[in-house]
Amino acid sequence: LFLIGPWNSMIALAESLNDNFLRYVCNNKDITISAGISVYKPGEPVITIAESAEHALALSKNKPGKNSITIFGETVTWDEFKTLDSIKDTMQKWFTDETINNAMLFRFNELLEMAKQEKEIRDLQFNIQMEDMECLKWRARFKYTVVRNIGRNLKGDKKNEAIEEVMKSVVWLDTHHGALKIPLWQIIYNQR
């Protein structure tokens, strides 16, 4: 299928198609689907969108085990996508409650890129340049950023509780690295 529509509707549709397909094949783990979603501004030529979506689909199909979705340039399994969707709900709640603000969302984006680069360095384990080591600072920057920016409108215990809750998201960065872009960018795009 090649579908064009609002980006957030396409994400929900892809997830629904996968869930319904699983039911259709009686949850047979050997029969799966993959998806590739590309996001463009209105007015982009359809051929450009089609080529980008085809590339995203190829990334999903080339992932070991297939059964994946690629969005915002990140490829994850459908199971991981569901986990990331629950992370999105938590981040959205933080944003709605003003525990985090727009600036913090963009700082998360910088941190996830650093975490992704760190993973790539660990996977390479050779030919590491000194300038590539900058990404290893992401945990320290994460803590500094959270303590400095979380709950700006809160005081005392409420601020400390908010900081403590957001600090737990370091596990998300450690686990999902660049794939954390999927829930984060959905929240950022929804602000536009």
Image (cartoon, rainbow, N blue to C red):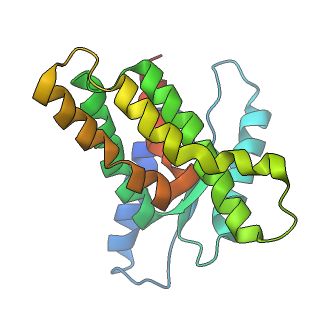
User: Residue at position x 53%, y 70% from top?
Assistant: 67
Left or right side of 156 for 47: right
Above or below: residue 24 compared with residue 187: below
User: Residue at position x 26%, y 26% from top?
Assistant: 99
Foreground pick, 10 / 153 = 153
Residue 71 shows in the view: no
- Residue 45, picture quadrant: top right
Above or below: residue 97 compared with residue 53: above
User: Residue at position x 32%, y 72% from top?
Assistant: 23
Foreground pick, 12 / 74 = 74
**Residue 133, percent from left and from top:** 73, 51
**Residue 46, percent from left and from top:** 73, 32
Residue 26 shows in the view: yes
Left or right side of 34 for 40: right
Left or right side of 139 for 87: left
**Residue 84, percent from left and from top:** 40, 52
